[in-house]
Amino acid sequence: MKHFGLNIWGDDNFIIEDDTIHINHASRPSLLKLTQEIRTKGHKGPILLRFPHLIKKQISTLFKTFEKAKKEIDYQGDFHAVFPLKVNQFPNFINTLMDVSGEYNYGLEAGSKAELIIAMTKTPLGAPITVNGFKDKEMISLCFIAAKMGHNITITIEGVGELQTIIEVNTIFNKETEEAIAPKIGVRIRLHSSGIGIWAKSGGYSSKFGLTSTELLEAYEMLLENDLLSHFWMIHFHIGSQMSDIVPLKKALREAGNIYAELKKRGADELTAINIGGGLAVEYSQHSGNADRNYSLDEFANDVVYLMQDIARSKGVAEPDIFTESGRFIAASHAVLIAPVLELFSQEYHEKGLRLKEENPPLIQELYELFISLKRKNAREYLHDALDHMESLLTLFDLGYIDLEDRSNTEILVNLIIKKAISLLKNEGSDELVRLQNRIQEKYLVNFSIFQSLPDFWGLAQQFPIVPLDKLDITPSNPATIWDITCDSDGEIGFKRELPLYLHDIDVNKEEYFLGFFLTGAYQEVLGMQHNLFTHPTEAVINFDDEGNYSIDSLTDAEDLMDVLDNLNYDTNALDKLLKQRIAESQMITEEEKRELLGKLYLYLSENSYLKTIQAQNETIQGPKK
Ligand SMILES: *Cc1c(COP(=O)(O)O)cnc(C)c1O
């Protein structure tokens, strides 16, 4: 567990050297160095780092893999891709995405009006825009406006009613024109096959989206009657995110491929594309034997082109162009959340915390002697004695025979005995020891919010790789539970025996210890909630120049307290006035103290909600290193 499963989830993006984790690119700075550099600029609390080179890597891997798969079987259709905006709409991400993808004619997928505006402004003319999800007349009108700007835009209709609206809007927008300038039309089909996994509700017959075969035939006739058949060019499906198994995709491809061929034979001459949606999974697992997917990107691409070719050949139609809308696969790896550990909770179980008396209850005295005389050869026996004594002592407390100090001594001594026994017996690794070790797990209080930064852990128990940025030359021994700083007991990543996380024993009063949460670039940011009013963390973009040197760009601080309240529609001017007034009118303090308090108050109001780390009070402990 010294490498935290990096070989499983890391995809060669990071490398552990000496005692830290480095970016495996260009000058290979360590994450610790970047973090400390940002913190010396005065940013405290959690920090989200974005890596444009990893966005570029994912996009070029996707395109290259499909090109290779096509070449192998001499596939005739083209390959295109769009990025589904719902996966990450943050400007620092989208701007970078568009910057690094120019050579691929990469486009955007929008599922709402606001996303459509992003797509209309960020997609270069000619690059594809697809518009999915439920749409009203206004949203469809926006698509017509985009088409008239010259955008290569496709409306995917999700139901027959939507097509009716498109026909109406078309008559308004193309009243005068001989040749209609209108968006291209795609149709989402309702598959009888569906994906598997926790996200798989998007496909299948009970899905929210898509047309049945009957509706498809109806739509075909409506298009024909209204002179819009020449705009119908794409079949679309999406079987759900984070597809763990490839089999449902193959089923969906066969279904969609045959629908495509049937419609072409019926006379849909302009129908030339199949859009296979997203769903390409990301490997988040830190533990072997617990993989998130059973296929590689090569296999995925080979299956898609092979099946499409097979169907097209057997039905005697042209091989379709293939579109993907993979989002998670493109975005997940680009962002790493880094958060400082504020406190370890069982540090109170320290010998110096004992409050032994002149005369202790006999069982406590015995516990103490067990602790002092514990040796390798008697460790197991003494450990059992200690656990037995503990049960008796806790019962004695419940019955009123021993006091609170005795109980505290019991807790400390038993913990010390377990720890000492574990270290003496560590080569034996019996089940019992593992169980005991798990029982004395350490709680790490971390300066972040799970609700804000890992909402899929909270909502779906999605695991994210967690790695400390330091001490990676030492095998960690503390079974770890992570607590965030919200006042909610769900803000906890509990220790799991099946997927154990071990962290280092540290003294936070003497040294800083940061945890990296990896693969957080997809979905987490916009799904993140402001529970307890913890906001999107401070973020920075790490760019590399041609010489391989890095720069920390677009540093954006988390929102300050007043902006947070402003977003909730509080009248912050009134709040501000009231705070001032309360200080001014206070009968309890002098004029001088009032001025001082006002100064302090305004300083605090200009900061974000996250905690200043405990170490921040003691700047002398550790300068930047590495
Ligand atoms: C969400 C969504 C996607 C993206 O799925 P990923 O699993 O992130 O690749 C693609 N297409 C549609 C229609 C979607 O709703």
Image (cartoon, rainbow, N blue to C red):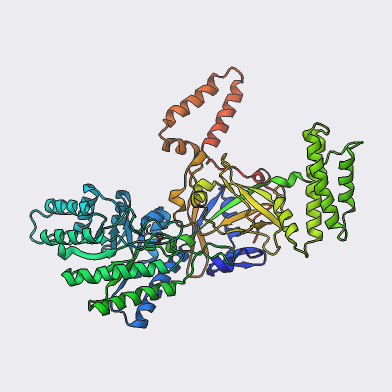
Tell me what residue is drawn at x 71 percent, y 55 percent.
Answer: 435
Residue 111 shows in the view: yes
Q: Residue at the top extreme?
A: 587
Please tell me which residue lies in front, 21 or 193: 193
**Quadrant of ligand 1 in image:** bottom left
x then y, percent, for residue 537: 51, 48
Q: Is residue 309 above or below residue 606?
A: below
Tell me what residue is drawn at x 41 percent, y 58 percent.
Answer: 200
Residue 81 shows in the view: no
Tell me what residue is drawn at x 61 percent, y 19 percent.
Answer: 588
Q: Is residue 317 above or below residue 560?
A: below
In the figure, residue 479 lies in which quadrant? Answer: bottom right
Please tell me which residue lies in front, 275 or 390: 390
x then y, percent, for residue 70: 35, 78
Q: Residue at the right extreme?
A: 358
In the figure, residue 274 lies in which quadrant? Answer: bottom left
Please tell me which residue lies in front, 327 or 420: 420
Report the label total: 0
Q: Is residue 107 above or below residue 349?
A: below
Looking at the rendered image, the quarter that the C terminus falls into is bottom right
Looking at the rendered image, the quarter that the N terminus falls into is bottom right
x then y, percent, for residue 431: 73, 60
x then y, percent, for residue 149: 21, 57
Please tell me which residue lies in front, 183 or 250: 250
